[in-house]
Image (cartoon, rainbow, N blue to C red):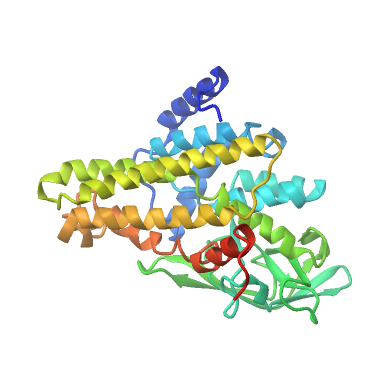
Amino acid sequence: MDLSYTPRQRAFRAEARDWLEANVPRDPLRSFDTPEGFEEHRAWERRLHAGGWAMVPWPVEYGGRGADLLEWLVFEEEYYRAGAPGRVNQNGLFLLGPTIMEFGTAEQKARYLPPMASSEEVWAQGWSEPNAGSDMAAIQATALRDGDHYVIHGQKTWASRGAYAGWMFGLFRTDSGSERHRGLSFLIVPLDAPGVSVRPIEKLNRKAAFAEVFFDGARVPVENRLGEEGQGWKVAMSTAGFERGLMLRSPARFQATARRLVELFRKNEAACDPALRATVVECWMEAEAYTLDTYRTVSRLHEGGKIGFEASLNKIFWSELDVKMHETALAILGERAELRPEAPAAEGVGEWLDGYLFALAGPIYAGTNEIQRNVIAERILGLPRK
């Protein structure tokens, strides 16, 4: 793997840096888990799209820039370096979009990708159900064929962005007699359709980051199916690979947190437990290791390879690293770690507490780390099932 950048990549980095420096909002946007903040972030996404930076590796005709994945990594590094806002449409851009690229028809690509790139349409993720969390094969929500429509009954829960998004993608059982991985189909559902009800779910900070979604005879056209009927598990595993292995959590995100952690330690070193120095160094090294591993993965993809079960290794690594970095920050801050961002005495450290609360979800979403360890044991190490 050649870690040197080409002249083209260096020019791309300079262009991205110049644009971000000129366009990133000077004041932080409100949380996209509030109605006002959601619209502020969607306006930012429109600005990114207008500048050609919404999803740089997508083809130009779908709202992208035609860049390769190495250039996408470069852009992500500049994006986090600039302190740009979080991506409100990440479910669409980083998960569904690549899945449509792989499994969608020409008509589906033309219909869904351009308004996804501009965030005219924002997407929620519809995997989990009350009795099907990390075990997606236990899905019970049905979508039974009635002519040229599917009629959906059931419930999804913990739908990311579900409180404010207009669309959802998810798995539904299209063969009522099927079990486990068989008989599932991947469907695209408008959340304003008759028979769909959305109930927001608040996080620990009382912001509506998720939603329960209820389906009571909602009808969606058969053309809203992605991939073949009954082959939804195959499509969903491709989406999960993007979620766990590459697109959803770029290494730049963790590099930025590691840099902030180093700065925090330096400012507070005199009052810290000296042992924390070693932990801070470990966090920085692990963020760099994840970055190098991601570059290796992208290099393999450029040579025609695919993301396989090692995506589970990635998911465990970045989720536990995120918790470790935030726990270390709270240990550095001591009593000040309990301050929320809006507290008068927070002086900029309150984001660590919010970040810590979010990091705790990392080992759970995208498939719990316990399940990922089972995948690693069985599919990579070849160990027998218990």
Q: In x, y percent, where is residue 315? A: 51, 56
Q: Quadrant of the N terminus?
A: top right
In the image shown, does 136 or 169 lie closer to the viewer? Answer: 136
Residue at left 79%, top 64%? 231
Whether residue 56 appears in this view of the structure is no
Q: Position of residue 184 (x, y in %)?
A: 75, 70
Horizontal relation, residue 37 to residue 233: left or right: left
Is residue 147 depicted above or below 20 in this figure?
Answer: below
- Quarter of the picture containing the C terminus is bottom right
Q: Position of residue 216 (x, y in %)?
A: 69, 80
Q: Does residue 60 appear in this view?
A: yes
The correct choice, above or below, for 167 with respect to 103 in the image is below
**Which residue is painted at 34% across and 43% down in the image?**
284
Residue 103 spot, x, y in % from top left: 76, 52
* Residue farthest toward the left in the current orientation of the protein: 270
Q: Would you say 209 lies left or right of 1 here? A: left
* 355 sits to left or right of 59: left
- Residue under the image location 78 percent in, 61 percent down: 225
Name the residue furthest top: 7
Residue at 25% x, 60% y is: 340
